[in-house]
Image (cartoon, rainbow, N blue to C red):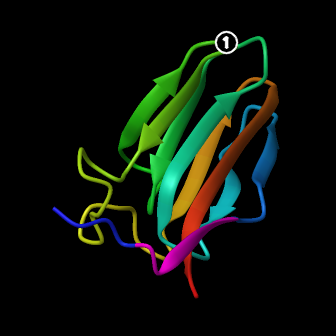
Amino acid sequence: MSVNNSARAETATELYATMDGTTKLIGSLAFNPVQIIFDNQGTVAIQIYRNQTTNVWHTFPAGEALILDMRAAHGLAPNFTFSVGDTFYGNGASGPFSISYTYAKEL
């Protein structure tokens, strides 16, 4: 299988919010992520929602980080990623939560 060398890694602006016990907008994806890091930097659990605020996607215990590598085993997976515009919300008693990601920038 060939490797796509026509793209380079680029960093997107970090999505960030400080939780206060209400549902907070963390941010929306401006690009399709290649790798994405969800990071609960606080000392309490935070529930994360994607594109709505009714179904919890994942509850992050205090201090937990999750790294998703969306490239699959062979490095090329344009059909397996979060979508541009996907919006993430969080809810927790207190503490910061961030989402950082890289994306493929065409040459």
Q: Residue at x 77, y 11 (%)?
A: 43
Determine the residue located farthest toward the left in the rendered image: 1
Please state which of residues 68 and 94 is positioned toward the viewer in this rendering. 68
Q: Position of residue 60 (x, y in %)?
A: 54, 22
Q: Residue at x 37, y 51 (%)?
A: 70
- Decide whether the magenta segment is chiefly helix, strand or loop: strand
What's the magenta region?
5-10
Q: Is residue 12 above or below residue 41?
A: below
Please state which of residues 41 and 9 is positioned toward the viewer in this rendering. 9
Q: Position of residue 72 (x, y in %)?
A: 26, 48
Quarter of the figure with the N terminus: bottom left
Q: Position of residue 91 (x, y in %)?
A: 63, 36
Label 1: state its secondary structure.
loop
Q: How many marks?
A: 1
Question: Quadrant of residue 22 in the image?
Answer: top right
- Which residue type carries mark 1? Ala
Q: Which residue is mark 1?
A: 62
Question: Quadrant of residue 29 in the image?
Answer: bottom right
Please state which of residues 97 and 23 is positioned toward the viewer in this rendering. 97
Q: Residue at x 73, y 42 (%)?
A: 98
Crowding at dot 1, Cα within 10 Å, few <14 / some 14-19 / many 20+, comes out as some
The question of residue 39 being in magenta is answered with no
Q: Is residue 58 above or below residue 6?
A: above
Quarter of the figure with the C terminus: bottom right
Left or right: 90 in relation to 15: left
Left or right: 67 in relation to 57: right
